[in-house]
Each structure stands twice: as C-alpha cells, then as structure tokens.
Image: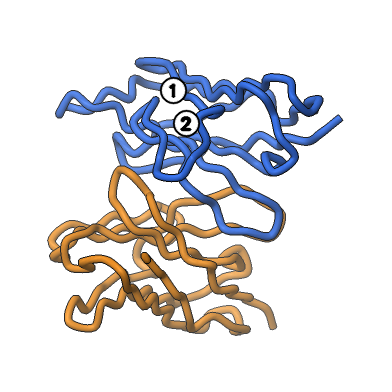
Chain colours: A blue, B orange
C-alpha cells in the first residue's frame, strides 16, 4: 500500500498569514493514464470532509482561490495564502492512484 | 444539488452484522463510482470500500476484506455496505462518497458502534 505522510501534524497560524502543509507518498502517484490522483480534503470541526483540491492543483467548485495545490511525483503541498477563521480544521491529503490512502491529517489552528 | 444520505448505523455486538445504506440524489447515480470511508472517534480517515458505476470493479481495505460487501442498486440510486463479523475496531462514522479518483461529495455519515 502507498503510505502518505503529512507534515506538520499541527500548524498554529496567525489570521491573515500564509500556511503550508506538505504531503509525501511512499511511491510515485503518477497513474498509468498520465494523471496524478492526489487530492486535498478539509474537515471542519463536527463536519464531514469536503474536497478542496483534486489532481494536485485543481480547485473544486466553490473553493476560495486562497487555497492552492502543487507538486509532482511523490511530494505535494497545500498552501493557504491568507488564513481565515473558517479555515480551522483538519486537512488530509489522499492518493487514489493505487487503491486509496489518506495522510494522517494536519490540524490547522489559529494562534 | 448533490445529496448523499447514509442510514443503518447503530449499536451492534461484536460478531454481529449491520447493513448501511446511502441514498443519493442530484446526479446521475448510475454513472459514478461510489465509496465508503470511515473515521474512528477522534481519528483520521480510512478508506473502506469502493464500487464502480456498474458494479464491475470493487475495492476493499485489507482490514475489512472478507467481512464487508459493497453493492449498489442503480434503479434506487442507493449504495450499500453489508458488514458482518463486526469488531470493536470497526466502530466509526461511515461516510458515503461520490467519485472514484476524485471524492467530490460526502454524506454526513452514520455512526456504527460495536460494543457488548
């Protein structure tokens, strides 16, 4: 199974400041069809997860443009350009190239 | 509007069985793969099972293989998860999710508690 490792596991951020979460996979996430199925999910407190970013860098419908994704191969990053109070929650990377696995989650909190 | 509504959760004894249902609306259910993902209390997300749009391909996590069966009824726009030989570590909120490689919509979840 592909193992997904996120860092940091906790990220205290000041409102209005940027935040960054890294995700590394134990093997390349490039699928035989040429796509890289790396997604980012947000789970606000008491809510189900919701899709933020799919295939590395594509924002899902309704996701603010302060969220961006980047990376390739085995190393990926989610960036929030200016953190807002509503961004508090846990962020997960998820690969769907070979089966499906999630990272451990990164808790974003406000300082 | 896409809606996924799970039902069927509850308290069950170890070794028991339960069937979860997910009623879908707002999209062409028969055209999309569907999944079950679970989350133990206070823990992260774990993929459980996936089923292609016409049911030809399935996926099971090793932790549930041989005990859980995923199925769908496209005429009723409903996804199922038959769970048997339940264990305490199956206790979790079970989410129904639309999409194969891109999990774009999630239900609110249904809680399964395995305890004597």
Image quarter hosting the N terminus of chain A: top left
Residue drawn 17% across the image and 67% down it: B30
Q: Chain of mark 2?
A: A
Give the residue displayed 44% in from the left and 22% down from the top. Answer: A26
Camera-nearest residue between A96 and A63: A63
* Chain assignment, label 1: A
Along the horizontal axis of the image, is A97 left or right of B8?
Answer: left
Spatial distance from mark 1 to mark 2, Cα to Cα? 5 Å
Against A74, residue B16 (above or below) is: below
User: Where is residue B59, by image quadrant?
Assistant: bottom left
Describe the element under mark 2 as helix, strand or loop.
Answer: loop
Circle 1 residue: A26
| Percent of width and height locating residue B19 | 42, 82
Look at 30% across and 34% down and name the residue there: A97
On the same chain: label 1 and label 2?
A: yes
Disc number for residue A103: none
Foreground residue, B114 or A11?
A: A11
Using residue B92 as the reference point, say whether residue B94 is left or right of it: left
- The residue positioned 31% from the left and 57% from the top of the image is B50
SS under mark 1: loop
Where residue A90 appears, as percent x and y from the top left, is 65, 42
Q: Position of residue A7 (x, y in %)?
A: 64, 23
Badge 2, how many Cα within 10 Å: few under 14, some, many 20+? some
Image marks 1 and 2: residues in contact by CB distance under 8 Å: yes
Count the numbered circles shown.
2
For disc 2, the marked residue is A3
Viewer-closest of A94 and B4: B4
**Chain-order first, disc 1 or disc 2:** 2
Which image quarter is the C terminus of chain A in?
A: top right
Q: Is residue B112 left or right of residue B36?
A: right
């Amino acid at each position: 199974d592909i193992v997904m490792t996120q860092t940091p596991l906790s990220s205290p951020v000041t409102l209005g400041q940027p935040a960054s979460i890294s995700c590394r996979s134990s093997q390349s996430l490039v699928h035989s069809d040429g796509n890289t199925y790396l997604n980012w999910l947000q789970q606000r407190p008491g809510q189900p997860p919701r899709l933020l970013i799919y295939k590395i860098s594509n924002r899902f419908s309704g996701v603010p443009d302060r969220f961006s994704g980047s990376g390739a191969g085995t190393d990926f990053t989610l960036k929030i350009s200016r953190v807002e109070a509503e961004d508090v929650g846990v962020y997960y990377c998820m690969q769907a190239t070979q089966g499906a696995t999630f990272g451990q989650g990164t808790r974003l909190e406000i300082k | 509007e896409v809606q996924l509504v799970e039902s069927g959760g509850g308290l069950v004894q170890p070794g028991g069985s339960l069937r979860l249902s997910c009623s879908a609306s707002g999209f062409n259910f028969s055209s999309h793969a569907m999944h079950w993902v679970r989350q133990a209390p206070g823990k992260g997300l774990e993929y459980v099972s996936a089923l292609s749009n016409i049911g030809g391909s399935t996926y099971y996590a090793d932790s549930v293989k041989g005990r859980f069966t995923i199925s769908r009824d496209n005429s009723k726009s409903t996804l199922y998860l038959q769970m048997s030989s339940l264990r305490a570590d199956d206790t979790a909120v079970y989410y129904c999710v639309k999409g194969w490689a891109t999990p774009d919509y999630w239900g609110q979840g249904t809680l399964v508690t395995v305890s004597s």
